[in-house]
Image (spheres, rainbow, N blue to C red):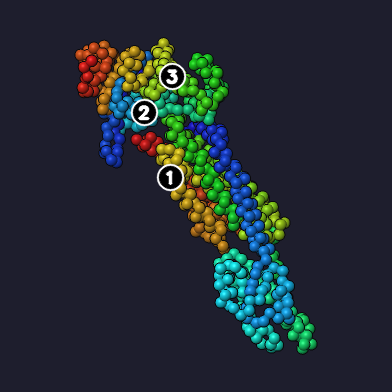
Amino acid sequence: MSWKKSILIYRKEILDITRDKRTIISMVVVPLIGIPLIFILLGGFMSKQIEKLEEQRYTVFVVGAEFESSFFGKLIAADEIDFQDFGNDETNARALLEEGDINGILIIPEKGITDQINTVEIRVLVDQSRESGSIVAKKVKAILADLRRDISIKRLAEYDAPESVLTPFEWKVENVATDEKMSGMLLGTILPYIMILLTLQGGVYAAIDMTAGEKEKGTLETLLVSAVSRIDIVLGKFLAVMTVSVISALISLTSLSVLLVYGISYIAGAEDPVGLSLSIDIGRVLLAGLMMIPLAAFFASLLLTISIFARSMREAQTYLIPLMFLVIIPAMMSMVPGSELSDSQAWMPVINVSLVIKDILMSNTDVARIAITFFSTALYASVGLFITMKVFQKEEVLFKV
Amino acid sequence: MIKTSNLTKIFEDRKRGKIVAVNHLNLSVNDGEIFGLLGTNGAGKTTTLRMLVTVFKPTEGTAEVAGFDILENPDDVRKNIGFLSGDTNLYARLTAREVIEYYGGLHGMSRINARARVDELAEMLDLNDFLHQKIAKLSTGQKQRVSIARAIVHQPDLMIFDEPTAGLDPISAKSILDFIRSCRSDSKTVLFSTHYLREAETLCDRIGILHDGELKAIGTLEEILDQTDSTNLEHAFYTLAGLEIQPD
């Protein structure tokens, strides 16, 4: 074995691969621009859609009681909902609701809301299979709550009771989590998954190009007949794939951290855009990045071992699809609500890294589990590399004779 | 320079079972001679050469190449040979200079030495016009010249060529054949395989005829013609391969 030759191969592979547009796209453009762009566009589009749905004026038919001004005045005055009297024809109103011609029905008992003591039941019918359904329900509920309060106050006035009778107490929920912890929670959920995926994705093209690509282009035999051992070849290629993977992961870590911290309100589904003063502990982000190094090594060995079996780059891509699935599922562990790294999970490949990064970002630092995750992943990477070297010794694999 | 003893290669094929590609081959190539290994497609030429350059391991037997045993010292064997075949292509995204320097480095040359050697080879093989161009941009002939430079960057005394002219246009093929001739004047040893009888006739000091993995004849052109009672190599080849000879 000669480190000098491995490093020479490594440098050549990096030079070669960085001259290829496809690598630059998968290593730099996708994590730096592609993924954030997806988040921004998707998030922006979704929040715009939600805004549009919220702002729209909806039609709700009122069925049952007469449309008398004392009660309905407030309903008619509502800006967001156009309440219309539909007499007593509930059946037709339902048909219209099912057709989507109207957005809701308010069913009020015929006797109306004149009784001073009893509670009258009002039914709100919406079609929740439509996106507008829950918005209409929410808006109608708010209007009705206001109306109920107004009527209650009026009734109380008749008994000379003050308004405060209705409100024995008020409450307020306060979030004790620091901005850092909140950022950690948000980052910890999404980031591990995306980082693991991009670490793998970043190395895929490089690994294929350095193995099946060399076979396809006829450069492998040139390399094999030169005065270099196969161990040196594997080491050089392994380090090159790992470098590309790590760079890809670090770029995604940086771009997503910045995106999540400064653009959190844009993120899809973030209904409650947590205060925009989010901040991140750089030390924790670096520790999370450090955990990606043995994982990138593990991925590099898997990618090289699998793709050297293929005769062409296209074939290699097909061979790697199952690996992508095998990685995606455990990588998603960080997104499972309430998931935390257990002692046994610290030994499970990919799952451990996904959860340990989540823990690190959420400030749940357990040194022992971090160490187990780091070293067990490094161990799997070493075993993987050993297998890669064995496979590269097999002439039937290298030449498919 | 090369001596094989009972060199054998058997491939296991799931469908076809055992395939004996090379069967107890015994031949020797002397220092400074040009030796041609002649055979049809599938005769076992490529497999033989791949064993000699240590890319394949023999199933049985061994060989001594450039003073080293292919099983015991494969790394030393590769250090002392230059190999060129239709399957030894170059990295398309690197420049001609980068490729030659890279292989110089893999053969243990220092950066400075590799650079100097590239300058020397560029003069010798007329590469200067495209030395800084990427391989992908070069013509087939230019690529061939860079390939030759790549194969001799470490100044090996033994050159092994596997069907070096297969698929090349006449001009590119000529540059390879001229190079093989120049090896003779540099007193290098050359072993090359071909299925072009004419190449063997004009270039080789000695010829070996391989058929179905077995060496059917070995010797100078005259010796082979004598052995087979033939007047030309084509006739001798068909006789040895047990093929029907079409009357002229």
Q: As drawn, is A288 to the left or to the right of B70?
A: right
Residue B40's image quarter?
top left
Q: How many marks?
A: 3
Q: Dot 3 lies on which element?
A: helix
Task: Indicate the position of residue A246 as horizontal and vertical percent values.
Answer: 57, 43
Residue located at (55% from left, 60% from top):
A336
Residue located at (58% from left, 44% from top):
A30
Disc on the earlier residue, 2 or 3 = 2
Q: As drawn, is A259 to the left or to the right of A332?
A: right
For the C terminus of chain B, the quadrant is top left
The Cα atoms of the two marked residues, 1 and 3, are separated by 38 Å
Task: Indicate the position of residue A99 as horizontal and vertical percent values.
Answer: 56, 68
Tell me if residue B168 comes above or below residue A364 in the rendering. Answer: above
Query: Tag on residue A319?
Result: 1
Task: Indicate the position of residue B236 as horizontal and vertical percent values.
Answer: 24, 17
The Cα atoms of the two marked residues, 1 and 2, are separated by 28 Å
Query: Tag on residue A130?
Result: none
Say which chain tag 3 marks.
B
Residue type at the position of mark 1? Tyr
Residue located at (20% from left, 14% from top):
B229
The Cα atoms of the two marked residues, 2 and 3, are separated by 23 Å
Callout 1 touching callout 2 (CB < 8 Å): no
Q: As drawn, is B124 to the left or to the right of B230?
A: right
Query: Tag on residue B50?
Result: 2
Residue A181's image quarter?
bottom right
